[in-house]
Amino acid sequence: MGDRSPKREEPSQKKNAPLPLVRQPNSRATSALKIKKAKPAYVSITVNLDSHYNSSLKESYYQQIYTEIKSVGEGGFGKVFKVIHKFTHRKYAIKKFKRITTSKEIYSEIRNNEKVGYHHNIVKYHMSWEEGNEAYMVLEACQMSLADYAEKNKVQENLIWDCLYDMCNALQYLHKRCLVHYDVKSNNIMIHQKCFKLGDFGTLYELSKPRQCTQSKLSDINISYSAVTIANQRLSPSVDVYDLGYTLSGLITGRVSSTLELLLKRMKFLIPTTRPSIEDILDSDAIKDVARRCERGLRKLYTTQNLEDIDVISTQSSEDCFNLPGCSKNP
């Protein structure tokens, strides 16, 4: 961004003539001047810029390292693009934060992703960087969100069971780490080949660090639950159970089995203590059947749309994450 300060006039030849006043750039311009070149952004887990980056070139880090495929969405804090790494040919999603996003908000989300670490049913976080007055986050590329899929396709009952199972595995992983997602919804559930992944950890919070919830924090969460949450003024893992039940119930367009209907209804009970826990759901006979079908490889592709935009990997263990440059490890 160019310097917006007025041009300095030639000083007077008169001896001891006062120098003209020069307006100081605003804080955003000052910040941009301090970060002319790309630098890694992290809180607890160190990440590095790609070794192919040349800071002496005029092209930005984004332009030097990635080829943009397409824009895939926009949220409250930024836009998401699918890209290809020019040198490894791996595919990623890059979130570009909006300029109105504060540094505090950006680094809060970076810290949240560092806390999450790796799980097969969670969108993988790789690294973040700053350049000028822009900030970027590199994430695992997925085909589409569950919300986008539901807009164009009739959602079958098997898909709801599969999503319920995958999301319960993701939430169980988070809850065991004393983390609550706090914003489980179809826009944050991603389809990746034959599985579902939970993403967007901007509202993540730790149970070990209780804090008062606010109206602004609840603005994007299911309205019917918000009133109860505001009244209680505290949260627990049962929030995620409710939101998941609410989200999946909203996808049902026809008749489903009474087993699924009853389970989702129980997940939406307004009194948190009356809802099943994530462990209760995973221990149910119906979910165990879903788990066996998954373990036997009986799932089919939910959609071939955007399949070319992701890296299709048949099997992937937690160790695979550590072999990727700049990938966050479990703190």
Image (cartoon, helix red, strand yellow):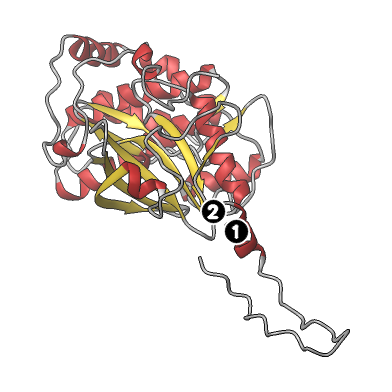
Q: Which mark is residue 82?
A: none
Q: Amino acid at mark 2?
A: Lys
**Residue lying farthest right?**
16
Categorize mark 2 by other alpha carbons within 10 Å: few (<14), some (14-19), many (20+): some
- Visible residue check, residue 51: yes
Residue at image coords 63%, 80%: 6
Q: Is residue 102 left or right of residue 244?
A: right
Horizontal relation, residue 305 to residue 5: left or right: left
Q: Please tell me whether mark 2 sits on a helix, a strand or a loop.
A: loop
Q: Is residue 146 above or below residue 160?
A: below
Q: Amino acid at mark 1?
A: Leu
Residue at (24, 47) in percent of width and height: 148
Residue nearest the viewer, comparing 13 with 190: 13
Note whether 31 is above or below 228 in the view shown: below
Mark seen at residue 36 = 2
Looking at the image, residue 150 lies above or below residue 34: above
Q: CA distance from mark 1 to mark 2?
A: 6 Å
Q: Are marks 1 and 2 in contact (CB under 8 Å)?
A: yes
Quadrant where the image shows the C terminus? top right
- Which disc is residue 33 wearing? 1
Percent of width and height locating residue 5: 63, 75
